[in-house]
Image: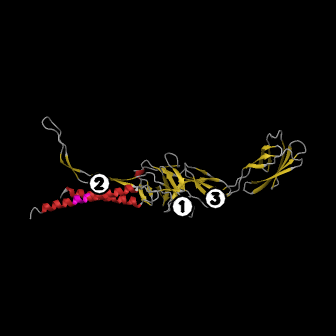
Amino acid sequence: MLRSLNTGIAGLRAHQTMLDVTGNNIANVNTTGFKASSTQFQDTLSQLTQAGAAPDQQVGGTNPAQVGLGVQVAGISTNFAQGSTQVTGRATDMAISGDGFFVVNKGGNTFFTRAGAFDFDSNGNLVTPDGAIVQGWPAVGGVVNAGGPVQNIGLPGAATTAAQATTGVTLGGNLPSDAAPGTEVVRDVEVFDALGESVTLTLAFTKAATGNSWNVQGSDSTGATGNTTLTFANGGYSGGAINVGGVTVDLADLTGYADLSTLKVTDKDGRQAGTLTSFSIGPDGTLVGSFSNGVREPIGQVALATFDNPGGLEKSGNSLYAATVASGGAMVGEAGTDGLGTLVGGALEMSNVDLSQEFTNLIVAQRGFQANSRVITTSDEVLNELVNLKR
């Protein structure tokens, strides 16, 4: 049989594979986080029909004569170039800007993905559309331990932030130096105990009979009291404080000029317990919760992974990849560190398929398939002529 028959068949198979790869790329043109693949060919063994010879004094050298035996697929490589970013506005959508993969757990197995279309399940876990749970580091008391092992992360609906007792209040503004003796200025301040219970702290400033002085009387709704005297010199006050029920009221910023009564609370600590109302995602993957008491603190951080050879990852379906011996082990870290990209919240990375290139590849594969089919047809005609030599 003619060698060209098998060569043509090998060409048909190789170009059919190229068509399959190109068709899959086009089918996934709108798949979130999809990475296009490309086909590389290489020739197969060549049959040596005449060996090469070295030159000598009488005869020049000759080159070897070889006949190729066809083509084969050398490999199908994945293009991990960045896809375009599409803003969705959904708080749970995330896109990686740069290198890296999300780490997810499905059925006890670890996978990796670039598709950040996440949502929350009934247990509050952050999951992919097919139920794989996103991995990261949950926060404990508002602190994330990014050096520990990755765990399931989410946004539990029962998340709360602890109450904090008020220990300090700062007053600012002016007490009028020209106020009549006995004039009283009263300010009520809401403070909190260790359980987050609201306590009213009342501060009464009474103008003394002589000089630019004020008597300060403090009391709260639990019955605690405290008092001091403020004396201003040239409108300024050298500092001082009053303590009422464990709350220190700083009076150092007060002034005593004429015609102004602007006494106000400029700062205080303490808070009630709060429940989670919303969240946002930072560039480093930190999930920051907003609580009903006005506190914002981390509740977790999304982990990213990178590989020495991302092209060695094995596609596992559902936009997931599995690590292999070719890819090497996953190196897990925080977004924005150690060569990992940053995260963009409320956005998705789209497919990096280039349609113009893929349609061109279709033409190339089709013409290659046609050309190899012509090789088979021509070989068949030659065999037919050979059979017809004897009529």
Q: Foreground: 301 or 378? A: 378
Question: Are the residues at dot 1 and dot 3 in contact (C-beta closer than 8 Å)?
Answer: no
Q: Residue at the spot x=25%, y=60% of the render?
A: 373
Q: Is residue 173 above or below residue 3?
A: above
Q: Is residue 9 visible?
A: no
Gap in angstroms between the C-alphas marked 2 and 3: 59 Å
Residue 94: x and y, percent? Answer: 52, 55
CA gap between label 1 and label 3 equals: 17 Å
Magenta stretch, residue numbers: 371-376
Q: Which mark is residue 276?
A: 3
Disc marking residue 328: none
Whole-percent x and y of residue 62? 17, 42
Nearest the camera: 159 or 339?
339
Q: How packed is label 2: few (under 14 Cα within 10 Å), some, or many (20 or more)?
A: many
- Residue holding disc 1: 119
Marks 2 and 3, the one that precedes in the sequence: 2
Please give left or right for residue 372 compared with residue 208 in the image. left
- Expressed as whole percent of the image width and height from the top left, the position of residue 279 reads 60, 56
How is colour applied across the structure in the image? secondary structure
x then y, percent, for residue 356: 38, 56
Secondary structure predominantly adopted by residues drawn in magenta: helix
375 part of magenta stretch: yes
Q: Residue furthest front?
A: 259
Circle 1: element type: strand
Q: Amino acid at mark 2?
A: Gln
Q: What kind of residue is marked 1?
A: Asp
Residue picked out by circle 2: 72
Q: Quadrant of the N terminus?
A: bottom left
Q: Which picture quadrant has residue 213? A: top right
**Dot placed on the residue nearer the N-terminal end, 1 or 2:** 2
Quadrant into which the C terminus falls: bottom left
